[in-house]
Amino acid sequence: MRTTKEAFADVIGVTVGNVPGNPAVISMRGFTGNTVNVMQYGVRVAASTVTTRDMDTWKYEKIEVLKGPASVLYGEGSLGGAVNLVTRKPTLDEQKLEGLISTGSFGTKRAAIGVNQPLNDTMALRADVSYVNSDGFYDVDDQETTTLNISASLLFKPNDDLSMIFAFDHDYDEYDSTYNGSLLVPASVARNPSGIVSSKNGLVIDKSLRRSNYNPDGANSGARSTSWRWTTDYRLSEDWTLNNIISYYTAHREFFVSSEQNYNAGTGMFNRTVQRVSYDHQFWNERLSASTDQLIGGFRNRFSVGAEYSYTDLNNPWQNGTTTSVDPWNPDVGSFPSSAAQNWPGAGRNVLYQSNMDNTAVFAEDAFNLTDDWLLIGGMRYEDINLRRTVEDVTLGTAQKFRPTYDPFSWRLGTVYNLTPDIQLHAQYSTAVTPVSSLLLISSANGDFDLSKGRSVEVDFKASMFDGRTSLTGALYQIDLEDILTRNPNDSTWTVQGGKQRSRAVELTSSAQLTSQLRADLGGSVVDAHYEELVEAGGADRSGNHPVNVPRTTANAALIYRFESVPITVGAYVRHSGGFYTDTANTYFVEGYTTLDASIAYEMKNATLTLRGRNLTDRFYGEYSGYSATQIYLGAPRSVELSLAFKF
């Protein structure tokens, strides 16, 4: 997996999109965007739609995925689940040099190198660098993409009781003339209409516009971030261990794009809006926890308790307006307007948002063995959130200040039972909270609302068969989210809390070593996600409708075969996603798709040469929607990649 988006999409039940303002945005267990948290090394910096980027995966040791409510661990926003990106760590045991170079379709070039160097018996250094440049993974006009990731960490381990890691990360990405999706047009004017979108008003995707990009010249998006962290693990006694993480994060992000683009039937042109959005973001966090593993009355008990404090400062200039319309087939895209005030006239068009937030939390978890095979687990988290928001309209010379506060309490209770040494059963009830919109970007009107409340019931199992050669896991769950924003049914001009959303699903995954040479991995999910109660402007009742960007079915399969006579491994990979809607009215439905990838790898003494093909059938499909409901982000066409990985 080259990028975090590709890695996220490899998880059963997960759908991912690359919306310019929300790269690598996740849909998980029927919920999307801010309801799924993405952390760096266990620390949540902000809502995933604010901080997450589609980064190269080279520097990551692993990507952990926790499905379902995770507010007990990671705080507000973790309703659909949480993803934790864990960077590679230095080790004292060996000197290591590894790297990768690759080239592929659409002018894509990738290079990475990593080194682990023990300095003495107590210290080791790890450093990683990766660089990617491409004309664009989606084969869209004027979308050159560049990413650079640098990480370094120093391990200090003077004895078995104390370990410290000092780490640094710098991430940079830039997209020229960012792709904002393929736009729907009436079937009557489409030159090569496709059937991948069904609509109630006759709009379709025109294949002849597949590579078109309608951003003005000078449009771009990107981010650069730097983070520092100091992690300490200290064994206080035979029974107690202390963990402390101090982290600092700073970032600058820019989105200069034509965000919404829609077909105007009266003119036959695409109307366009433009936005100049910047974020200057600083965050620091202190997280201290203590854990113990000991016997109570002869029964094993694992307990942890901790506290966390974070402070965030966000400055967010936001300019928005309209620009010239363009002919779909012969566009004169024009130039992106500068930040000069005269380009953004009118109220609400040139605004400076400022946010400061303090978040203090305490948390605890316990796992108590009632018997050797029966475990009772529980956890809780209390947060005290204080937000200070200033909205300054530069054009009008006015300023508005508001200070919402929140004190959510989340908890979970579950049990694990070993039915046999190879079969484990698990059941859990958990609660979570999520804001009605990202807290750092919340409007004054939405700041008056409480956090939405979620709850989940889940039963699952894990089984190992055939002497451990086959594993099988399954889950059945229901997640309810209450107090989402809706309209007063008696007066639809009033926004109130009271809406409800529900997701029910079953997930199954299996991994089998069929022979010493052949391995198979399979997984799938079926989700019923819908609004139990939702009224929108004008009194339109959306109850029973499906949420945006949530497919009913997803499935992944992989078959990997390693030859005995020659050092060659071949693989085939299938991904299926069901269809999804792009609006809460369920006017537009994007058909599901299935893609096929394949690889062949030749192993040498210290290197592996791999040829990989993606979307080999060249399936034309939509993978996500964003901004307006008529902007569909198409999946990448067929591509190939040749890579050489080495290790010494």
Image (cartoon, rainbow, N blue to C red):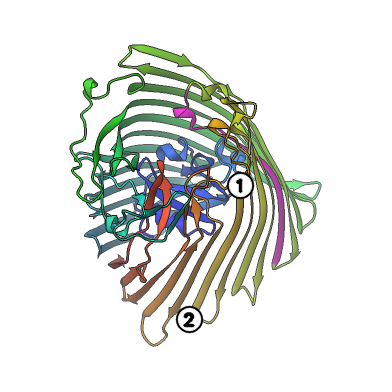
> In the drawing, does residue 335 fall left or right of residue 630?
left
| Secondary-structure class at tag 1 | strand
Which picture quadrant has residue 488?
Answer: top right
Q: Which residues are magenta?
A: 423-443
Name the residue beneath numbered marker 1: 530
* Figure label count: 2
Q: Position of residue 261 (x, y in %)?
A: 33, 41
As shown in the figure, which amino acid type bears the numbered disc 2? Answer: Gln
Q: Position of residue 531 (x, y in %)?
A: 61, 43
Foreground label between 2 and 1:
1
Quadrant showing the C terminus: bottom left
Is 356 included in the stretch rendered in magenta? no
Q: Position of residue 282 (x, y in %)?
A: 38, 29
Q: Is 126 or 590 nearer to us in this picture? A: 590
Quadrant showing the N terminus: bottom left
Measure the C-alpha gap from mark 2 to mark 1.
43 Å
Residue at image point 34% right, 54% down: 188
> In the drawing, does residue 370 fall left or right of residue 526?
right
> In the drawing, does residue 68 fall left or right of residue 48?
right
Residue at image point 36% right, 85% down: 566
Is 430 included in the stretch rendered in magenta? yes
Q: Is residue 437 above or below residue 425?
A: above
Q: Tell me if I can see residue 236 in this picture.
A: no
Q: Position of residue 204 (x, y in %)?
A: 39, 54
The residue carrying pointer 1 sits among few (fewer than 14), some (14 to 19) or many (20 or more) residues within 10 Å by Cα, namely: many
| Secondary-structure class at tag 2 | loop
Name the residue beneath numbered marker 2: 517
Q: Is 127 or 462 nearer to us in this picture? A: 462
Q: Which mark is residue 500?
A: none
